[in-house]
Image: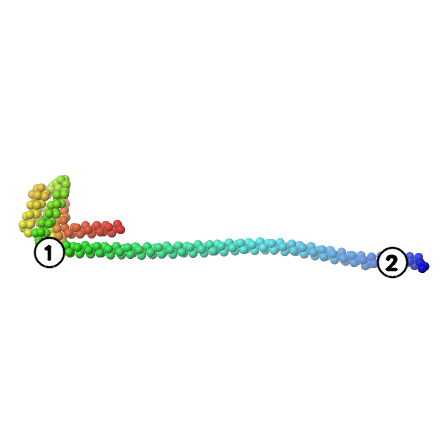
């Protein structure tokens, strides 16, 4: 095989020229395009990363806002629930107070009606007792009725202290005038007996002026100048009525 060095040199020169031309007009532009493309891609990647960062930041802000809104909503709902519960409890308490007032008013009304009915029954009982006493006294002989009341008067005067009895005697003065009121008229002998027994009980002579008051129902009343001694059914019934009214008021 014969090697032609001239041809080889020319071919080598041609290859070098071709390489330079490729480098000059093909490889460098391609590298420039690739560099530009890489720069563009890197810029886009940087922009995308920045956009992603901003998106993440905005997402975090939105999450925070949503968390804040959720917390605020929960707070509002809890406050509304608490307020509703408080209003419900307040209404329930008010209803209980109204019910208690109604029950108390009903109790007081029932108690008042019961007290009024009891007072009426007591008054009716007293009136019935007075009527029965009047009938029983009317059925008894007059002499027995008169003797019974003068004995009651004598026992009362006997229970007085010496000072109290002397105070009554001093009221009679020199005349010894005394007024005796009975539920019915006394016979002459009964009046004489009353004068004697009153004088003995008081320890001095007395002048008795007799009068009649049927409203006494039974018994008698002695009128001194400054004192009255009552021994009648009327006075007893008045005392009982006053005592019952006092008890009713205390209840």
Is there a contact, CB below 8 Å, between mark 2 and mark 1? no
Q: In this view, does 160 lie above or below 45?
A: above
**Disc 2 or disc 1, which is closer to the eye?**
1
Q: Residue at x 76, y 57 (%)?
A: 34
The residue to which callout 2 is attached is 15
Mark 2 packing: few (<14 Cα in 10 Å), some, or many (20+)?
A: few
- Percent position of residue 148, x then y: 10, 49
Q: Along the line of sight, which residue is nearer the eye, 44 or 187?
A: 187
Q: Which mark is residue 63?
A: none
Q: Name the residue furthest left.
A: 189
Is residue 212 something that shows in the picture?
no
Farthest-out residue, top: 163
Q: Position of residue 56 (x, y in %)?
A: 63, 55
Q: Residue at 24% of width from left, 50% of height from top?
A: 247
Horizontally, residue 175 falls left or right of residue 102, namely left
**42 and 82: which is toward the camera:** 82
Q: What element carries label 2?
A: helix
Tell me which label, 2 or 1, sits earlier in the chain.
Answer: 2
Q: Quadrant of the N terminus?
A: bottom right
Quote the CA–CA distance across marks 2 and 1.
Answer: 176 Å
Residue 147 showing in the rendered view: yes
Percent across and percent down for residue 160 are 14, 42
Q: Where is residue 204 in the image (x, y as percent from the top left)?
A: 8, 42
Q: In this view, does 228 lie to the left or right of 27?
A: left
At x 49%, y 54%, the residue is: 78
Q: Residue beneath label 1, please? A: 139
Residue 37: quarter of image: bottom right
Q: Which residue is drawn at 51% across and 55% down?
A: 74
Q: In front: 217, or 26? A: 217
SS for callout 1: helix
Crowd band around label 1 with a 10 angstrom C-alpha radius: few (<14), some (14–19), many (20+): few
Judging depth in this view, the residue of 115 and 180 nearest the camera is 115
């Amino acid at each position: 095989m014969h090697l032609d060095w001239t041809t080889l040199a020319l071919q080598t020169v041609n290859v070098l020229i071709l390489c330079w031309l490729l480098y000059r007009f093909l490889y460098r532009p391609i590298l420039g395009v690739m560099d530009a493309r890489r720069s563009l891609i890197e810029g886009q990647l940087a922009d995308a990363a920045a956009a992603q960062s901003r998106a993440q930041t905005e997402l975090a802000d939105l999450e925070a806002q949503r968390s804040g809104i959720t917390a605020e909503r929960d707070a509002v709902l809890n406050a509304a629930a608490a307020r509703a519960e408080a209003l419900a409890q307040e209404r329930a308490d008010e209803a209980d107070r109204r019910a208690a007032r109604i029950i108390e008013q009903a109790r007081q009304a029932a108690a008042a009606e019961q007290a009024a009915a009891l007072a009426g029954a007591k008054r009716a009982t007293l009136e019935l007792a007075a009527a029965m006493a009047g009938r029983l006294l009317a059925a008894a002989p007059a002499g027995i009725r008169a003797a019974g009341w003068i004995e009651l008067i004598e026992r009362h005067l006997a229970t007085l202290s010496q000072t109290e009895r002397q105070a009554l005697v001093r009221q009679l003065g020199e005349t010894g005038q005394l007024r005796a009121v009975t539920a019915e008229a006394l016979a002459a002998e009964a009046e004489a007996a009353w004068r004697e027994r009153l004088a003995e009980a008081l320890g001095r002579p007395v002048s008795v002026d007799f009068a009649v008051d049927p409203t006494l129902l039974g018994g008698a009343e002695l009128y001194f100048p400054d004192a009255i001694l009552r021994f009648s059914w009327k006075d007893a019934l008045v005392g009982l009525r006053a005592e019952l009214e006092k008890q009713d008021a205390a209840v």
